Image (spheres, rainbow, N blue to C red):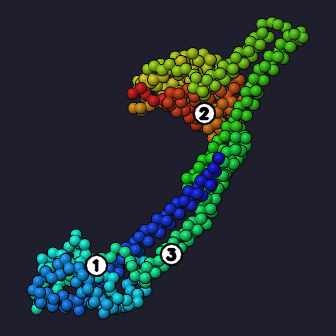
Amino acid sequence: MKIRIKHKLFFTLLLTSVVVASGMFWFMQWSFDRGFLNYVNKQELAQLEQLDQLEERLANSYAEQGSWQFLRQNDNLWRRLHSEIFTATRRPERTPERDRFGTSPPPPPPVDMRDIGPRLVLFDINKQRIIGGPPEVRINLKLKPLSHQDEVIGYMGLIPAEALSEAGDLLFLEQQTESFALMALLMAALSLLLAFPITIHLLRPIKELTGGTSQLIAGQFKTRIPVTTRDELGQLSDDFNMLAITLEKNEKARQQWVADISHELRTPLAVLRSDIEALQDGIRQPNAQNLETLHAEAMHLGRLVNDLYELSMSDVGALTYKKVTVDPVGILTGTIELFEPRFAQKGLTLTTDFSTAPSCSVLADPDRLQQLFSNLLENSLRYTDSPGQLEIRMDGTKTHVSFHFRDSAPGVSPAQLPKLFDRLYRGEESRSRAKGGAGLGLAICKNIVEAHHGKIDAVSSSLGGIEITIELPLRS
């Protein structure tokens, strides 16, 4: 049978309360019994101080006999002696003392004291037992000295009672037991009444989380649950809402990603289809110029597919990196030499400043670093207006080396700068499709830099364009 957590929590609270109430009842009853018994024994010891007639008779008998030998092993004489005294002596009423719980036993009625006779013990001057009590009676009893002519001749003691015997005392003890039992039952009933609302209160956030999780499973990523507490369940509710927000953003990004890819692939495919159909219909002739146009569109489509493939491999961690100790300045210099003719052809000035940078080495994949630098140079070459310029500067610290790519206009707005590394993103000015970009180059750059445990950032350039900074850790 499946037991719900609500029932488990309810019965746990209830069982805990019942166990605590039962433990308190047992402890209070045990403590009260011992306390009340000690109280009775103290009263009997106080009464022992008032048995002057018994003391006088024992002293006179000792004086007549000259020793206690007449009482040794003479149980009948000992019982007759104190029975006669106790029959004539009635116990005075005692003023009840308050116990540790603030209750007072009622004063018992005056009765004879023959019940303490069997617990009286007589000792000689050396505190050796003469008569009364068991033979192995304890010597650490509270003893009252017996005197004759100002000389101690023996001691008399009273063995404490181990249980109550008088009707009044037993009645009072029974009443207190009933009171303790009633108190325990009231505590258990109160726990029963409190356990249910506490259980409902504690399980309300869990119920909200369960319902919200079911909605997330169903694809309803706009689901949010109210945060009603500031404890661990409240923190869990906050985390759930953050998860829902993240899933909603990821779903929107996925939908946008699919739409953007479809759009990017549709454009070159539409151009290829229209050109091929024009050739088929005889509108255009299959000459070198038209074939060059078809080849350019096919190359553009191939680059787009290749970029998408590399980006997807990088996202899933499947892009291979063969890291060795390399000189990043040498790789960057070699890459710049490959791009210099194209920059000059477009009318862009390419300048470098590596003078302030010390010699350094990094642990990196040289092919991926060249791809990183190539993408950044291609990005500036494609989007910088002519005439324009690109400045590449390098600096470093003891732990990192930084490369700064700063180009001229056009730039992007500050709000667009954080989005430049998003896949398929284009700014309104510098990222137009007319300039041939698919919006994947900087996204690939970001993945390559992060794979080398570095950082990449974009800010507005003092030249009017964009300044992209790459920071890579040095080889330790």
Q: Position of residue 345 (x, y in %)?
A: 64, 17
* Mark nearer the viewer, 2 or 1: 1
Instruction: Kindly identify which numbered label has been placed on residue 178.
Output: 3
**Residue 168 falls in image quadrant:** bottom left
Query: At numbered mark 2, what does the secondary structure look like: helix, strand or loop?
Result: strand
| Earlier-in-chain disc, 1 versus 3 | 1
Instruction: Kindly identify which numbered label has been placed on residue 139.
Output: none
| Earlier-in-chain disc, 2 versus 3 | 3
Structural crowding at the residue carrying mark 1, measured as other residues with C-alpha within 10 Å and reported as few (<14), some (14–19) or many (≥20): some
CA separation, marks 2 and 1?
Answer: 107 Å
Q: Is residue 123 left or right of residue 94?
A: left
Give the residue furthest to the top. 287
Q: Is residue 89 left or right of residue 9?
A: left
* Mark nearer the viewer, 1 or 3: 1
* Residue shown at the point (60%, 16%) measured from the top left: 341
Q: Position of residue 127 (x, y in %)?
A: 15, 76
**Residue 197 falls in image quadrant:** bottom right
Q: Position of residue 232 (x, y in %)?
A: 55, 53
Circles 1 and 3, Cβ within 8 Å, touching? The answer is no
Q: Which residue is mark 1?
A: 119
Structural crowding at the residue carrying mark 2, measured as other residues with C-alpha within 10 Å and reported as few (<14), some (14–19) or many (≥20): many
Q: Nearer the viewer, residue 47 or 387?
A: 47
* Residue shown at the point (90%, 11%) measured from the top left: 281
Q: Position of residue 456 (x, y in %)?
A: 54, 32
Q: Is residue 400 left or right of residue 153?
A: right
Is residue 18 visible in the rendered image? The answer is yes
Check disc 3 and give the amino acid type: Glu
CA separation, marks 2 and 3?
Answer: 88 Å
| Earlier-in-chain disc, 2 versus 1 | 1
Q: Which residue is mark 2?
A: 466
